[in-house]
Image: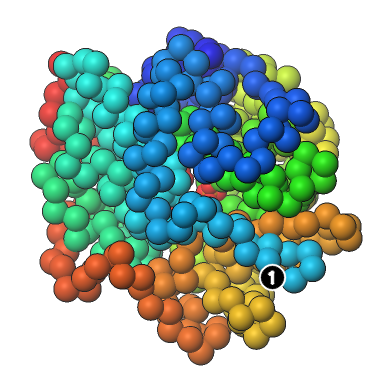
Amino acid sequence: MRYISTRADAPQLDFEGVTLAGLASDGGLYLPEEWPSFSGFEIQQMSGLTYVELAVRVMTPFVEGSLSESELHDLCEKAYGRFAHRAVTPLVQLDHQHHLLELFHGPTLAFKDVALQLLGGLFEHFLSKTDDHLTIVGATSGDTGSAAIDGVAGRERIDIFMLHPEGRVSEVQRRQMTTVHADNVHNIAIKGSFDDAQAMVKRMFVDPDMTGDYRIGAVNSINWARLMAQVVYYFAAALQLGAPSRKVAFSVPTGNFGDVFAGYVAAKMGLPIERLIVATNVNDIIHRALSTGDYSAGDVTPTQSPSMDIQVSSNFERLLFDLGGRDGAAIAAQMRGFEAERSMHLTNAQREGASALFASERVDEDATAEAMAWAKAECGEVLDPHTAIGLAAARKAGVGPGIPVVTLATAHPAKFPDAVEAATGIRPELPERVGDLFEREERYTALPGDYEAVRDFIREHATRSA
Ligand SMILES: Cc1ncc(COP(=O)(O)O)c(C=O)c1O
Ligand SMILES: N[C@@H](CCOP(=O)(O)O)C(=O)O
């Protein structure tokens, strides 16, 4: 399988290359040269597989030429062996139409574990064939950080520098990062928003001062391997609900557009998806883009769903590229325009293409709390605020009867106890596997929201490339 950049001006790479590269050297994002697809019969044959078997079946076409099936199987067994539920991503029925896909049974209690447990193993596997060292630079609004750190802490030949916006993640999220004391883990709190942190990370990939001396790697969803691993659970859920004979809709709490893009990939691969409902909080740039064509970023508003407090959604570029006829030069120009103005309009082809599969809803703070209260009162389920946004959107979107709607439950409620308690009166407890989180000492470095300060800190602490 070959991978191409959305901006058409970076070398084509194989799976190993894109996994280690993260962002393309032209600032674009890598995508498979063409979508692999399964027939209805092949999808039917997947029913009854274990999660690991299914993961191998779905991901094999993407890793062709870089990993054998048995290597992929071993890596998946290690990654998913650490999940607290045997089904890895169990499905829970709420009522006659609505279901929750619980993605929070991994070590750090959010859907990010599904991909980042695997990505840690992939990095180690590929690096073991070289003398090289990987310097991971990541940005987090709360969940990617802890999942990535858990995935790579203590692994040889890897350092991780994780930037989070100071004071804008929950206490549990912050402690899950800052109480990991492995020598290769470096937490940085920056002044500013997640968008500021993400912009610094992207700049590092195209800064010759960094790329000349360090092999910079990505754990954010700009890294294709992240999305690939997330495609699997769309198959897992749809198969349980009757695919390929029955269509299924998904509602996806959305920030950086990675999770819902994985759903788009599943549809491209032949999974019968009726609709992908993009659920945003009041940071609603994606909702505006899909409903009116206006993709313009304002300031980030802090909410009770901090992991979705994002305005510039990296993976939207992948969708625009695919919908607009895969014209890399046009996307490069469109994205350069957006980077200069923080505003752009979708083309007619992009809007029409998106409307065939996507719907979107904006869920404000009151509606988020109402959804948490409704799920508790009517279904006995305690949801985290991000999942509640997905459920509120699912119930609003008006999907036809007979079509099951699956809301992605992206985080465990105990990561956001204050918001959950305010809405439901219940203070969810942290599962035992998180351990003595509140007893452990926190370590992190606070830096100004200034690219040079962050870059100098990383240069001081990172290991140079071989
Ligand atoms: C709990 C939670 N829900 C939803 C999202 C949004 O997912 P995405 O950024 O892939 O759109 C995030 C962050 O990414 C998250 O941490
Ligand atoms: N919500 C994320 C933001 C980063 O998104 P990613 O999926 O691109 O890593 C977080 O929790 O950090």
Toward which corner of the image does residue 345 lie, by quadrant? top right
Count every numbered label the image shows and give the total. Answer: 1
Towards the viewer: 344 or 397: 397
The residue tagged 1 is: 94
Q: Residue at x 52, y 43 (%)?
A: 51
Measured from the top left, where is residue 85 in percent x and y? 45, 58
Q: Is residue 137 left or right of residue 15?
A: left
Q: Quadrant of the C terminus?
A: top left
Q: Would residue 191 appear left or right of 381 to someone viewing this image?
A: left
289 in relation to 105, above or below? above
Instruction: Tell me the colour scheme of the image.
Output: rainbow
- The residue at the far front in this view is 48
- What is the residue that sits farthest to the right in this orientation? 401
Task: Residue 24 in the image: state x and y as whole percent.
Answer: 44, 22
Q: Residues within 10 Å of mark 1 (few under 14, many from 20)?
A: some
Residue 318: image quadrant is top right
Residue 119 image offset from top left, x and y in percent: 37, 35
In the rendered image, which quarter is residue 316 located in? top right
Q: Is residue 358 visible?
A: no
Along the line of sight, the residue nearer the viewer: 30 or 394: 394
Q: Report x, y in % for residue 435.
A: 24, 68
Whether residue 356 can be seen here = yes
Task: Residue at 89% x, 60% y: name it.
Answer: 401
Q: Can you say whether 295 is above or below 5 in the image?
A: below
Local SS, label 1: loop
Which residue lies at the image location 69% right of the left edge and 45% below the top edge? 239
Residue at disc 1, CB closer than 8 Å to ligand 1:
no
Residue drawn 61% across and 81% down? 380
**Looking at numbered disc 1 in the image, what kind of residue is underneath it?**
Leu
Give left or right: position of 341 versus 145: right
Which of the pair 465/273 is nearer the observer?
A: 273
